């Protein structure tokens, strides 16, 4: 009997391994290998003019990038976009909205959650066109038509000073549903007796959330932060449809700068170096999140 049970356990382990093989192959072909190539080409002068001829140039691409004011400005814009859009707009507001939904009637919660998830599921090209038609200055978009009919002057939401706020709002609108979904699951998994005890102690709703519920959502917080950071750092389509990085580079995230470097300047080696830097930023932020959660 022991031999039979031992064989069964070995067969189960082998079956699990065999089931995971397609996933490993997929990861290697579409994730690990492209990242390896990106690292490799970032140390070359690969160009779209002739992709078959390139040579190793060491850290020249990285040195040139950090000497470029445009690249440093792009990093600054990306950090602002990440902090306001992802950390504050999606994670923080998403957790509060999820908590407020748990206080409402289940039918209302279902309707609101569905609407939010529809926004999250909307393709970024569609969302970009929708937001552009809403915020456009010339021709006048929906909001400016309303403002004009109310006697106010139209607002150029895509001016050099306002464009960054417009893309932040659009990105929050798209990503909020994901965070709400994660935090709804987390809040509903909290022991009801803890919530009831806070009611007995007379804790107000927001006091209850910040002092009791939010600290119990560490796992959900780190999961949400990691994923929305990766999503936000990789945002390209929405920004390109809305502003294409303009005006005057005021919304030129690292992804937009990478695209322009690769397909306008034809410098694939430099573009790959930018991609590597984006990966490094994502890894560093992930480690910071994990460390912060561990310490807190």
Image: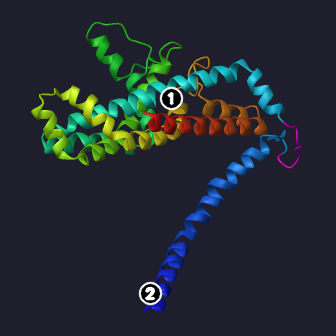
Query: Relative to the observer, which residue lies in front, 77 or 218?
Result: 218
Let me know if residue 19 is in the magenta part.
no
Left or right of residue 195: residue 254? right
- Is residue 236 visible to the viewer in this orientation of the structure? no
Query: Relative to the observer, which residue lies in front, 223 or 23?
Result: 223
Q: Which residue is mark 1?
A: 82
Q: Secondary structure at mark 2?
A: helix
Quarter of the image containing the C terminus?
top left
Residue located at (16% from left, 34% from top): 198
User: Which label's residue is closer to the chain start, 1 or 2?
Assistant: 2
Magenta region, mostly helix, strand or loop? loop
Quarter of the image containing the N terminus?
bottom left
- Is residue 69 visible to the viewer in this orientation of the structure? yes
Gap between marks 1 and 2 measured at Cα: 52 Å
Q: Which residues are magenta?
A: 51-58
Residue located at (37% from left, 26% from top): 134
The answer to whether mark 1 and mark 2 are in CB contact below 8 A is no
Residue located at (55% from left, 32% from top): 240
The image's mark for residue 27 is none
Left or right of residue 15: residue 74? right
x and y, in percent, of residue 246 in the image: 58, 21
């Amino acid at each position: 009997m022991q031999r039979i049970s031992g064989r069964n356990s070995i067969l189960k382990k082998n079956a699990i391994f065999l089931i995971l093989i397609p996933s490993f192959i997929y990861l290697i072909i579409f994730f690990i290998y492209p990242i390896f190539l990106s690292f490799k080409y970032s140390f070359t002068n690969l160009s779209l003019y002739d992709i078959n001829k390139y040579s190793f140039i060491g850290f020249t691409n990285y040195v040139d990038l950090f000497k470029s004011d445009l690249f440093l400005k792009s990093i600054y814009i990306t950090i602002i976009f990440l902090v306001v859009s992802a950390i504050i707009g999606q994670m923080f507001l998403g957790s509060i909205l999820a908590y407020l939904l748990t206080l409402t009637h289940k039918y209302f919660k279902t309707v609101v959650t569905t609407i939010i998830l529809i926004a999250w599921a909307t393709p970024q090209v569609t969302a970009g066109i929708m937001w552009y038609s809403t915020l456009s200055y010339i021709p006048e978009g929906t909001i400016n038509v309303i403002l004009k009919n109310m006697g106010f002057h139209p607002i150029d939401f895509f001016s050099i000073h306002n464009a960054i706020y417009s893309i932040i709002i659009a990105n929050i609108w798209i990503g909020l549903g994901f965070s709400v979904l994660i935090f709804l699951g987390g809040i509903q998994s909290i022991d009801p007796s803890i919530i009831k005890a806070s009611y007995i102690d007379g804790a107000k709703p927001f006091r209850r959330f910040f002092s009791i519920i939010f600290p119990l959502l560490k796992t959900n917080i780190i999961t949400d932060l990691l994923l929305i950071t990766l999503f936000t750092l990789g945002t390209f389509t929405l920004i390109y449809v809305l502003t294409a990085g303009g005006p005057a580079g005021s919304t030129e995230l690292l992804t937009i700068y990478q695209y322009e470097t690769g397909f306008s300047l034809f410098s694939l080696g430099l573009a790959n170096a930018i991609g590597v830097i984006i990966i490094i930023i994502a890894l560093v932020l992930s480690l910071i999140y994990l460390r912060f959660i561990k310490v807190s």
